[in-house]
Image (cartoon, rainbow, N blue to C red):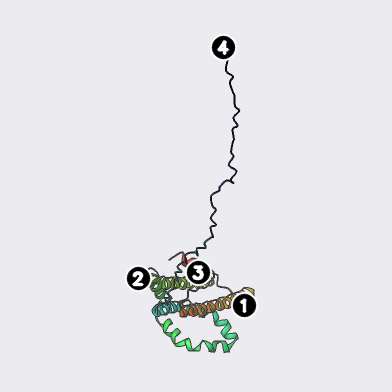
Amino acid sequence: MASIPFLRISPTTTTTTFNLKPPSFPSLRIIKPTYTPPHPRKLTITRMSYNPTPATDRLISTIAYTLPFFNSLQYGRFLFHQYPPLASLFNPLLPLLSLYRSIPYSSFVAFFALYLGVVRNPSFSHFVRFNSMQAVTLDVLLVLPVLLQRVFSPARAGFWFKVMVWFHNLLFVFAVLCFVYSVGCCVLGRTPYLPFVADAAGRQI
């Protein structure tokens, strides 16, 4: 009888090793915030150039307003008669007024000289042309009451005569104030804007 060798089975123990090391994380770098100052802006300083109005432009503009002023003196005769001290203020202007009245058709000559020679002349500055046109427009407005008076010829007394006197006094005061204001602005090199006149004059330039 054959002998069957016994198989010796030796149990083998399998040892499993676990690596219990903590996981390695990448090192964190602390980034400090850096402040970059803004780029300084370049300040551009623009200086305003002050160009004063030439003296010749001021002179021509001032002379232009003498046309409506001389033509408005006729409206002050009632105030001159009522207040003699007021008439004495205008006595120094009598020689110039006499010279102005001595020239035939002086009002028409001065009117067309300003309108055609200055207002429509592009060689003059806008300052001179506007002031001349404003003076011409004011002169036209002051001539209209005279034409109406000649057409209707109110009586020398009564209600309508009082209305005419009141209207003449109002026109005279208005014309004198416009003259003083316009001449003062022209001397300072500023453009005067007369009520009821500036808009009409500006449309003609």
Find residue 2 and name its label. Answer: 4
Lower sequence index among marks 3 and 2: 2
In space, the residues marked 3 and 1 are separated at their CA atoms by 36 Å
The reply to whether the C-beta atoms of the residues labelled 3 and 2 are less than 8 Å apart is: no
Residue at which label 3 appears: 198
Q: Quadrant of the C terminus?
A: bottom left
In space, the residues marked 4 and 1 are separated at their CA atoms by 179 Å
Q: Which image quadrant is residue 132 in?
A: bottom left
Find residue 123 and name its label. Answer: 2
Find residue 142 and name its label. Answer: none
The image shows residue 79, relative to residue 196, as above or below, that is: below
Foreground: 65 or 162? 65
The residue positioned 38% from the left and 73% from the top of the image is 113
Amino acid at pointer 3: Ala
Residue at which label 1 appears: 157
The residue positioned 53% from the left and 55% from the top of the image is 29
The residue positioned 59% from the left and 27% from the top of the image is 10
Q: What is the crowding at mark 4: few (fewer than 14 residues within 10 Å), some, or many (at least 20)? A: few
